[in-house]
Image: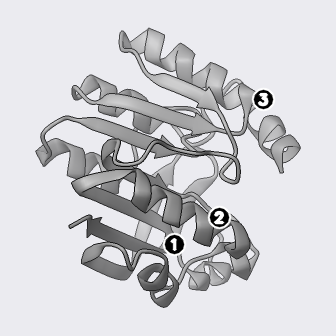
Amino acid sequence: MKDFWEERYRADEFIYGKQPNEYLRIYLDYANPGRLLLPGDGEGRNAVHAAKKGWTVDAFDISENARLKALNLAKEEGVTINYFLQSYEDYQPEPATYDVIALIFTHMSSHIRRPFHEKMVTALKKGGTMLLEAFSENQVLYTSGGPRDLDMLYNKEDIRQDFKGLSIQALEQLEIELDEGTYHQGIGEMIRMMGKKM
């Protein structure tokens, strides 16, 4: 999997664009800045946008090529982000560290996903917010991006189970039009979740 992402991020272009994910952007427009974690943040579009909004940003990905592009984008935009190399399986966050954790297209096999989501809940401060946007299982019917493996896609019941340590504020499955670089283009089906740690 690491080799796949290193190759994909080797391109000079920002393959998912330089603009932030729309769901995250809307949230950050109204939230008071704090400490934010962005797992699997790829080329850094979300991390850099959040830093420009005043957030203290930690981000990670498995790809060194992605990390270098993210750090270059941050420099270009005049902001600082803490971006480190890490896998979902090996990441061990400090408990109660983050005001917000945003899981934006963090697709992984279910045997990795469930324990990872538990770690994310642990890493969230009391009163903190968890955001998630990812492709639903129905995305296999679309050609706008995302994994083709059903086990790496999302359904609402799995999310309820994975995040039962949170108070779910919103959970919806919806069709949207993606315009995020080369690999997220066209109509797709998303699941979006917002939860609070009580």
- Residue identifier under label 3: 10
Mark 2 crowd level (few <14, some 14–19, many ≥20, 10 Å Cα): some
Left or right? Give the position of 105 relative to 62: left
Number of the label disc, if any, that sits on residue 146: 2
Identify which residue is drawn at 62% across, 77% down: 142
Q: Amino acid at mark 2?
A: Gly
Q: Amino acid at mark 1?
A: Gly
Image coordinates of residue 133 in percent, x first then y, are 43, 64
Label 3 SS: loop
| Dot 2 and dot 1 residues touching (CB under 8 Å) | yes
Identify which residue is drawn at 22% across, 51% down: 26
N-term mark: 3 or 1: 3
Identify which residue is drawn at 80% across, 36% down: 6
Occupied quadrant, residue 137: bottom right
Identify which residue is drawn at 36% across, 9% down: 78
N-term mark: 2 or 1: 2
Number of the label disc, if any, that sits on residue 41: none
Quick check: can you spot residue 144?
Answer: no
- Residue identifier under label 1: 188
Mark 3 crowd level (few <14, some 14–19, many ≥20, 10 Å Cα): some
Left or right? Give the position of 187 relative to 108: left
Left or right? Give the position of 87 relative to 30: right
Image quadrant for the C terminus?
bottom left
Q: Nearer the viewer, residue 99 or 18?
A: 99
Label 1 SS: strand
